[in-house]
Image (spheres, coloured by chain):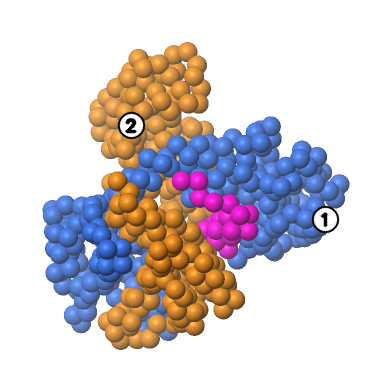
Chain colours: A orange, B blue
Amino acid sequence: MVSLKRNAFIISDRTGITAEALGHSLLSQFPDVEFNTEVLPFVDSREQAQKAVELVNAAVGESGEKPIVFATLVDNEIRKVIAECNCEFFDLFDTFVNPLEEVLQTQSSHKIGLSHRMVNAKGYVTRIGAMNFALETDDGVATTSYNRAQIIIVGVSRSGKTPTCLYLALQYGVYAANYPLTDSELEKNRLPDVLEEHKDKLFGLTIDPFRLQQVRQERYNRDSYASSRQCQYEIAQAEAIYRKAKIKYLNSTQMSVEELGAKIMQIGGLRRQF
Amino acid sequence: MVSLKRNAFIISDRTGITAEALGHSLLSQFPDVEFNTEVLPFVDSREQAQKAVELVNAAVGESGEKPIVFATLVDNEIRKVIAECNCEFFDLFDTFVNPLEEVLQTQSSHKIGLSHRMVNAKGYVTRIGAMNFALETDDGVATTSYNRAQIIIVGVSRSGKTPTCLYLALQYGVYAANYPLTDSELEKNRLPDVLEEHKDKLFGLTIDPFRLQQVRQERYNRDSYASSRQCQYEIAQAEAIYRKAKIKYLNSTQMSVEELGAKIMQIGGLRRQF
């Protein structure tokens, strides 16, 4: 039963993605309240801050409830402008800076965007390289490049291989290829030959057959491909192959791309590449 | 000058991605300290918490400096186990829950994973659909699908179109196509015909010609493609076309994929689709 409404703002001097994720996480702990949330990214000048203040002040509720503001603002002056508007102010960043200064016994630099710039310099080439690798080796092509792969995702058609590989590339800079287990491979009831020599890099995906059927029907509702019998057969065969070849695997049915990616990193013993 | 070393842990009951981003952002404010950071995701049981405690306790520095721990742990019991280990504990999540309860005058549910499960249910189909759309319309193919696009990224080869589209799909669930401005199109000095009717969806990318040359040389060092003269020519022509056709555009040279994505969302007036 949703009984309350509340306006909320995420205000950041950078992309707002971290603040949005944490703010969303916090608000989701209050399922009785219906939040109307707006993200204001790149608030990195007094002028931008003033614009944000106007938006926040205009969003005071009918009964006078102040909007909730989650902020990650590094610059003291900009933060002060926002904090003084008519809102309930939660500072997701600065709350921790003073205690950290005390623990580390050193001053923080209070500079915007240090974080992203560092990631930029170190990570840009790695991430784009990883993404190109995922695209070039998508769906079982360019298997001769598998020596450059850090992980090779295997699974039946529409089990989530491509999104997983692209996510691993973007988020972690990991070189991830993927190889589809097709009908003819599944019939043989063993690993495709081309994968044998890369066995230590393989990671299997499986999915609930009913969910697989739904996904396939949404895209190509052709003959047998999306039939209940075919989906059940493929999943049973794929899982049997994983177990026989002792390949680690995960069921993607209940997982977001983020969860799947983080689990694969953990189980596969992989590390962020930037 | 890096004068100090410190161990740090990011401990989360979910993927750890939000905690990692915020923790990294905070630590980057202390450029004089060299941090050795480890991420421990999916710490969602007493047993996992105990394992994490052992790792943290084993990481006390030679001169007795306690590791820094950034945590996002929803469960009170698990959080207590971690908070009591030999560390400097920063609670990125719970710090805000009590004040939020007071502001909202309601109890939080203190349940793990509410956030992700909601995103799952609402977003899974949207995000995967958007990603498939980006892949199907990559590099100027399937232009007949442009009526389904929310944005069409244009730019010369290797200006960052594909990563941008895939990121917009994954992060925001936005349907983003991309169309390459090739030599023959650039020579005509006007928008390709196929783009004319979608003019309101177009968004241009540009890049520093020197950077473009580097990126091209890393991949295919063939003849003219990666020459300084060719890169300068293509960028000048592309920017002239953007200005003439009044297409908004951004220079991707100094930006991370996240920044570029967030800027395009903002400038293009697009909203998260889940």
- The magenta region covers B255-274
Please give the label number shown on residue B244. 1
Q: Which three-letter amino acid code belongs to the residue tagged 1?
A: Lys
Q: Is residue A39 above or below residue B132?
A: below
Q: Residues within 10 Å of mark 1 (few under 14, many from 20)?
A: few
Q: Quadrant of residue A70?
A: bottom left
Proximity of marks 2 and 1: CB atoms separated by less than 8 Å: no
Q: Residue at x 39, y 79 (%)?
A: B30
Q: Quadrant of residue B250?
A: bottom right
Residue A154 vs residue B262, the one in the foreground? B262
Specify whether B110 is left or right of A206: left
Please give the label number shown on residue B127. none
Residue B42 vs residue A51, the one in the foreground? A51
Question: Is B164 inside the magenta-drawn segment?
Answer: no
The spot of residue A229 in percent (x, y) is 35, 15
Query: According to the image, label 2 marks what residue?
Result: A206
Specify whether B92 is left or right of B171: left
Q: Which three-letter amino acid code belongs to the residue tagged 2?
A: Thr
Q: Residues within 10 Å of mark 2 (few under 14, many from 20)?
A: many
